[in-house]
Image (cartoon, rainbow, N blue to C red):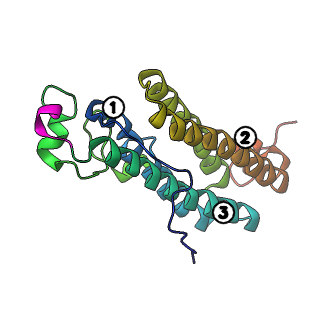
Amino acid sequence: MWIYEKKLQYPVHIKNPNPALASMIISQVGGPDGELSASMRYLHQRYSMPDGDVVGMLTDIGSEELGHLEMVCAIIHQLTRNINEDKIMDTPFAPYFVDHTTGVYPVAASGVPNDMKYVGVKGDPIADLNEDLAAEQKARVTYDNILRLCDDPDVRDPIKFLRERELVHYQRFGDCLRRVQERADHKNIYGYNPAFDKRRR
C-alpha cells in the first residue's frame, strides 16, 4: 500500500544533546495530541467515510503523520544519544531514563503512556472530521508550547516545519468537512438526521 522512502520528510541534525528538552518533545510521540495518535485516528477513520476523496485525504494525512512520528523520534534520539548519566541526573528526563534508558517510548511529557483512548473514531463523517480539525489545532498548540520553551535552532527548525504541516492538515480537513456537508442533507451541517429529528417549519 505504501512506498516508503528511507529519509525523513524534513532533515533533523541536532548537535547539542539536551535531555530536558527531550522530556518535553516526547509528548509529540505519545501524548494525547501527538503524531502516533494522529496517524492512528486518521488511518482508522477512513474506513467509515462515505466519500472516496475524503478517504484518500485521511489516508494521505494519516501516512504523513507516520512520517512526522519518525521525525519526532529522530529529534528525541538525537537529543539523548551518547549522553552520560551525569547529564541526565537532576533533569526532568531522569524518571523516563529509569524506565526506558534512551529508547524512544510513546509517552506524554507528563509521563502518561500513550493510550488508544486518545484516538477518536466515531464512524460519523461530521463528528470524525470535526475531531480531526480539533486534533490538528491541539497539535499546533503543543508545537507552539515547545517553541516557547526551546531556543536551540537545530530543534526549532524541524519543529517549525511540523507546526506548519498541522496548519495545512487543518485546512485540508476543513475542505473535507465542507465536501461531506455539501453532499449530505442541507441541515446535516449540524448533524441533522431525518430519521431522528423532526423538520422545523
x and y percent of residue 70 in the render? 44, 55
Element under disc 3:
loop
x and y percent of residue 106 in the render? 31, 50
Among all residues in the image, which is located at the extreme top?
148
Residue 49 numbered tag: 3
Q: Decide: is 196 above or below 146.
A: below
Which of marks 3 and 1 precedes in the sequence? 1
Point out the frontmost of discs 2 and 1.
1
Residue 86 falls inside the magenta stretch? yes
Q: Quadrant of the N terminus?
A: bottom right
Which of marks 3 and 2 precedes in the sequence? 3
Type of amino acid at the residue the image marks with label 1: Leu
The span shown in magenta is: 83-88
Which residue is rendered at x = 66% and y = 54% of the image? Answer: 125
Among all residues in the image, which is located at the extreme bottom?
1
Q: Decide: is 189 above or below 7.
A: above
Residue 21 numbered tag: 1
Do callouts 2 and 3 mark residues in contact (Cβ within 8 Å)?
no
Which residue is rendered at x = 72% and y = 42% of the image? Answer: 171
Which residue is rendered at x = 30% and y = 33% of the image? Answer: 18
Which of marks 1 and 2 precedes in the sequence? 1
Residue 190 numbered tag: 2
